[in-house]
Image: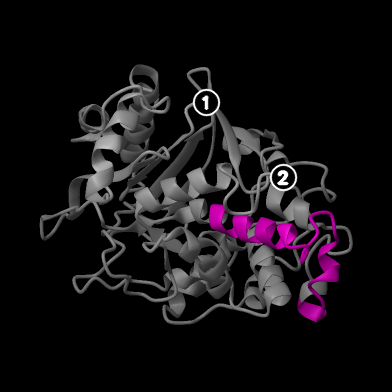
Amino acid sequence: MLTPMIPHLRLLLLLLLLTSPALGQHPDTLCRKIAEHFKGGAYPAVLIGYADGYMSFSQAFGLADSASQKPLQPDDLMMSGSTGKIVVSAAVLKLVSQNRLELDAPISRYLKGEWAQLTPNYNCLTVRQLLQHRTGLARYIFTDFKEDVKLNPDKVWTPQERIRYVSAAKPLFSCGSAFAYSDTNYILLGAIIEEVTKQPFYTYAEKEILAPLQLHSFTPTTQRSIEGLANGYAGTKDPLGFTGETLDASGKSRYNMQFEWTGGGYAYNPEDMAKLMLAIFNGKVFGKELLADYTATLPAPEVGAEYGLGIMKYTLNGKTLYGHSGFFPGYIAQVYYDPEKRAAYVFQINTTQPNGTQDMYGRIKSFFQEVI
């Protein structure tokens, strides 16, 4: 789905596209090659978004719902999984750019009270370490929480309740000394954002980041029904135990997706995420001065990449890419930004079955090798 353009600009745009350093090819050619690489994969459906500053689009292949045989549409949504952390880290860095938050300040400056002090390593943790996953905090999702969230599918979970699930866990390591990926870090960041802004996280993110960029598809996962959300298929080996289909016959989630919050917390269309990545690297979200901090990555072998301030650095076929991966029961998302071509690519599938995930990443590798 190409973004509508003002008619009298179309000729100029076409000339720009034909010489675009990001594409090196006509947009129709790029769309055709995407179809060649991703249509008919080992997943029910795939959404692909692209943006390069000259144009943006999304493409859809497959079925939004296997039972009804409903085709996936280019403007449909899938769950963000941890790619939603891109919005969270952008919100943190926006506050840093406004001198309302300091990266190397201890979290105790912003989070106080008994619940906060129960956080392991509380006395030495900094905002930067939360962003980098260098805190030693356990993952609240992989505790009794994953069973409790299924027992009460309509419960709205607070940051304080989530943190209590890890409060008795011994830190994996001392503050800043190693990497261990943990959604708990981003739950604390969400609480810090709310404390500093005196607004709900989603309100601040919408007003300061998403709305100014006209990224209207980003939908907070605060309800069990999300309009335009493709059904997800988790299979039988989901690590959280949310097996089977994500949505029931009425389109309602079988559990409360709110449990993820600032660990991910969005459904979106990939075109909008591609636009967000482009805006971040063009300095339009939190300025250009913080980009050096944002992309100052450290080894993160657990995720097969390096990790910065809410962004991963990948090496794919010898190419350096920045982005993030995302998992949510029934959904996989992968975001890339190519700094050489100044272009962003977002891939989403609606299955977490191993064969579907392996197929998607195999096709991505081939796509970047043969096309980009």
| Badge 1: residue crowd in 10 Å (few <14, some 14–19, many ≥20) | few
Q: Amino acid at mark 1?
A: Glu
Task: Give the farthest residue toward the left.
Answer: 69
Residue 289 is marked as: 2
Where residue 129 appears, as percent x and y from the top left, is: 77, 51
Residue 340 is marked as: 1
Disc with the residue nearer the chain's start (1 vs 2):
2
Say if residue 327 shows up in the picture.
Answer: yes
Image position of 112 (left or right of 155):
right
Label 1 SS: loop
Residue visible at 26% across and 64% down in the picture = 228
Say if residue 45 shows up in the picture.
Answer: no
Instruction: Reply above or below: 86 against 17.
Output: below
**Highlighted magenta segment, given as a residue range:** 86-115
Residue visible at 73% across and 62% down in the picture = 98
Residue visible at 55% across and 57% down in the picture = 87
Where residue 344 appears, as percent x and y from the top left, is: 44, 38
Q: Residue 109 in magenta?
A: yes
Residue visible at 30% across and 23% down in the picture = 25
Q: Residue 159 in magenta?
A: no
Residue 114 found in image quarter: bottom right
Instruction: Reply above or below: 96 against 309.
Output: below
Q: Nearer the viewer, residue 217 or 360?
A: 217
